[in-house]
Image (cartoon, helix red, strand yellow):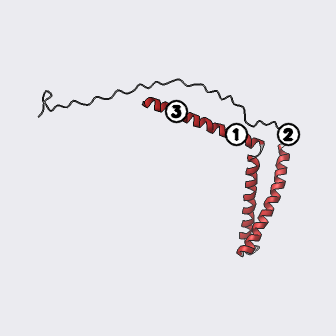
Amino acid sequence: MNDRNGSHFVPALREPERPRIEILPAEPIQFDVTQSATQHLELKTSSVDRAKGFSLVTGQLSAVLGIIAVIAAVVGWGHPLFTLGTLATFVSAYCVTWVGAWFIYNVFSVEGVSLIESLLKWKFLFREQAYRQGVRRNEHRQ
């Protein structure tokens, strides 16, 4: 056995001093940026008129593309004309066309442009926040 005064004594390692982490109060963030595309919308109609116009245009477009899909199914793939499969082809082509037109109409409308702009600004703020937190973490490690 080795005793503490012997030649083989190895003292325990000291724990390294941990750096003190100072918790700072939250900083107020001012995001005084005007919208890059400001809109002034004067509606001389109502939203009902806009919806009726969308339905008129999209209904005809969807019906035409549905009929083209049925013709392609009957001629190209040999489907019988009066079957449930042909009806499903027409309905699915009609619905896909209508949903696509609805999405494009809403994205490029005044409200859609404002929504996209605000979402991009939120994305910018989240990236800024992640960058600041990353810088603070690196400061404490050094």
Find numbered disc 1 in the image and state the secondary structure of the residue it sits on: helix
Identify the residue at horizontal 64%, vertical 37% (top origin): 122
Name which of mark 3 and mark 2 comes first in the sequence: 2
Q: Quadrant of residue 114?
A: top right
Label 2 CA crowd tier, 10 Å (few <14, some 14–19, many 20+): few
SS for tag 2?
A: loop
Give the Cα distance between marks 3 and 2: 45 Å
Q: Quadrant of the N terminus?
A: top left
Mark 2 highlights which residue?
43
Q: Which mark is residue 133?
A: 3
Name above or below for residue 67 compared with residue 80: above
Spatial CA span between label 1 and label 2: 21 Å
Residue farthest toward the front in the current orientation of the protein:
142
Residue sitting at x 76%, y 54%: 101
Task: Tell me which numbered mark, 1 or 2, is placed earlier along the sequence.
Answer: 2
Name of the residue lying farthest toward the left: 1
Give the amino acid type for the residue marked by disc 1 in the picture: Glu
Q: Position of residue 64 (x, y in %)?
A: 81, 63
- Crowding at dot 1, Cα within 10 Å, few <14 / some 14-19 / many 20+, comes out as some
Residue 117 marker:
1
Expressed as whole percent of the image width and height from the top left, the position of residue 73 reads 73, 71
Image location (x, y in percent) of residue 84: 72, 70
> Quadrant of residue 85 in the image?
bottom right
- Identify which residue, 120 or 60, lies in the foreground: 120
User: Hey, what amino acid is under mark 2?
Assistant: Leu
State the quadrant of the C terminus: top left
Q: Residue at 61% x, 27% y: name it.
A: 29
- State which tag comes first along the sequence, 3 or 1: 1
Q: Is residue 71 shown above or below 49?
A: below
Q: Alpha carbon of mark 3 to alpha carbon of mark 1: how far?
A: 25 Å
